Image (cartoon, rainbow, N blue to C red):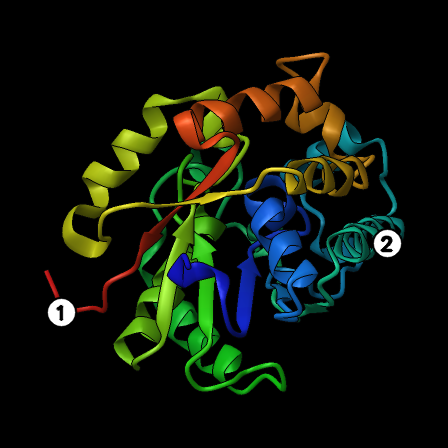
Amino acid sequence: MNSLMSGPALFIQPHYDDVPLSCGGTVALLAERGHEPRMVTVFAGELVDEMVGPFAAWKHERWKVTDAEQVLAVRRAEDADAARALGAPVRWLGLPDAIYRGDRYKSDPELFGTLMVEELELAAHLAEEIRQLPEWREGMRVFVPLGVGSHVDHQLVFEAGRHLASQGAHVYAYEDCPYAIHTPAGVAARLTALGSAVGEPLLVPVGDALETRLESIACYKSQVPVIFRFTTDFRGTVTEFALKTGGALGPAERFWPVRPHGSE
C-alpha cells in the first residue's frame, strides 16, 4: 500500500482553495477509506475594511465581492462546502493573507516573488501553532504546498512544513494547482530552487476520486473564473493534468517528501 494512503493526515492549505485544487482526490480517497483526513486553512483571519489597501481591493473586484465582511463570509462558505464534498472537516486559522499584511506585498510581482526575511519567523510560529491544534496526532502525515508559482503564502507554509519535519513529523509537499497546470516550467523551477529540501516524488492514483476533486473545486464559485481564466473548461483542464501526471497509472496526484532544515 502507498505509504501516503494510511493513517491520520493533516492537509495544510495557505488559502481557502489550495488543497481541493491540488490534491482533493487524495483527501477524498483517505476519507472514503475511513482515515479521517483533516484540512487547515492558514490565512483565514478576520477581515475589516481598514486591512484592504488598493492591491487587495483590486483582488476583491476580480472576485466580484468587494465588502470586507462579505469577502470573508463568501470565501469561508465556499471552503466549508468544498471540505464537505471531500469528506474532510476544515479548521480556519487567524493569520491574514499576504494581501492584507500591510504594505509588504502591494503587487502581483511582489506577491509571487521573494518571501520577506522577517516573515520566516512566521513560518516557525505557524509550525508550532499546527502542533498545538486539536487535530494533531504524533506520527500523522502532514501535507503542505510545494510552492510552485512562488506565491509568498505558499512559500511560507512550505517553510512551516520544514520546521515540522525538523521536529520529526512526516511531511509531504503537494503540487500546487493551478500554477503547475498553467506554467509547467514552474515545477522544475521550484524544484531547482529547493534543491535537496525535497526527496523524489510519489504518485497517488486517484481514479474515481478525481470527480470528487472536481466537485470540490466547483464549490469555489467566486474563484474559479479567476483561477481558470485561461480556459473555459476547468474540469477538462484538471482532468488532463491528472492523466498526464499519472501516465500509465491513470489520473494521479504528486507529492514530494519534505526534508528537515539542516539536511542539505
User: What residue is shown at x 43% (from left), y 69% (from top)?
Assistant: 122
Determine whether the residue tagged by mark 1 lies in a helix, strand or loop: loop
Q: CA distance from mark 2 to mark 1?
A: 40 Å
Badge 1: how crowded within 10 Å, few (<14), some, or many (20+)? few
Q: Is residue 250 above or below residue 68?
A: above
| Residue 182 seen by the camera | yes
Q: Amino acid at mark 2?
A: Ala
Q: Earlier in the sequence, mark 2 or mark 1?
A: 2
Residue indicated by mark 1: 262
Q: Is residue 260 above or below residue 26?
A: below
Q: Is residue 180 above or below residue 9?
A: above
Q: Amino acid at mark 1?
A: Gly
Residue indicated by mark 2: 77
Nearest to the observer: residue 239 or residue 92: 239
| Residue 99 seen by the camera | no
Q: Position of residue 117 (x, y in %)?
A: 31, 59
User: What residue is shown at x 53% (from left), y 35% (from top)?
Assistant: 177
Q: Position of residue 12 (x, y in %)?
A: 54, 62
Determine whether the residue tagged by mark 2 lies in a helix, strand or loop: helix
Image quadrant occupied by the N terminus: bottom left
